[in-house]
Amino acid sequence: MSDANGQSKRQPPDMSVMNPVADEDMVKNAVGEEYDELAMPPHVKLSDNALTPLIVAAIREIYDPEIPVNIYELGLIYKVEVKPTDDGQHDVFVEMSLTSPACPVAQDMPGWVQSAIMPIDGVRHVDVDTVWDPQWDASMMAETAKLQLNMFT
């Protein structure tokens, strides 16, 4: 952009959207074989079920529109519970939070999670509950998310 005299003017940065310092591939290259362990949020509770890794992989495809990190590594997923049913299928319960009650996608994100999980073979039903206790904070983020956002706590 230039002013009336043809001089170049610098645009102020758009602070409404957080940009990553490093993308997921850069972090994978930096940490190598430890990536999977570092991508695990410290407080998430996961069922011991064969479907759980598939569910986590599906959730990791969902990104917060304002923070360029997937919602799993961001620490928004608190619990994934998988229960077998009598018909050989599985019911899934996900407990999650948001970075803020004022999140602009607060009404949409639980549906995104449900839609990501439903196509998994063996899933019969998915319930997603949004909770505010405990309140989300940066300590709930996986180390990989902190690296992507250049946040060190």
Image (cartoon, rainbow, N blue to C red):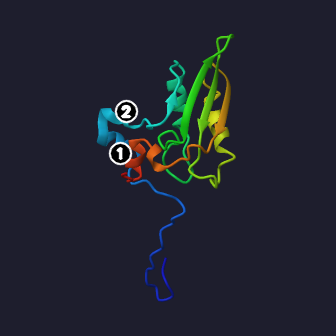
Residue bearing mark 2: 37
Tell me the crowding category of disc 1: few under 14, some 14 to 19, or many 20 or more residues within 10 angstroms, Cα based.
Answer: few
At x 63%, y 52%, the residue is: 101
Q: Amino acid at mark 1?
A: Met
Per the model, the C-alpha gap separating discs 2 and 1 is 16 Å
Q: Residue at x 65, y 28 (%)?
A: 118
Q: Which residue is mark 1?
A: 26
- Of residue 13 and residue 84, the one placed in the foreground of this image is 84
Looking at this view, name the residue that lies furthest to the bottom: 5
**Residue 153, percent from left and from top:** 37, 51
How many labels sit on residues?
2
> For the point 43% across and 37% down, which residue is it?
42
Q: Secondary structure at mark 2?
A: helix
Q: Is residue 18 above or below residue 5?
A: above
Q: Provide residue 136's location: percent of width, then percent of height.
A: 53, 47
* Location of residue 119 by image quarter: top right
Query: Percent position (x, y) of residue 25?
Result: 38, 42
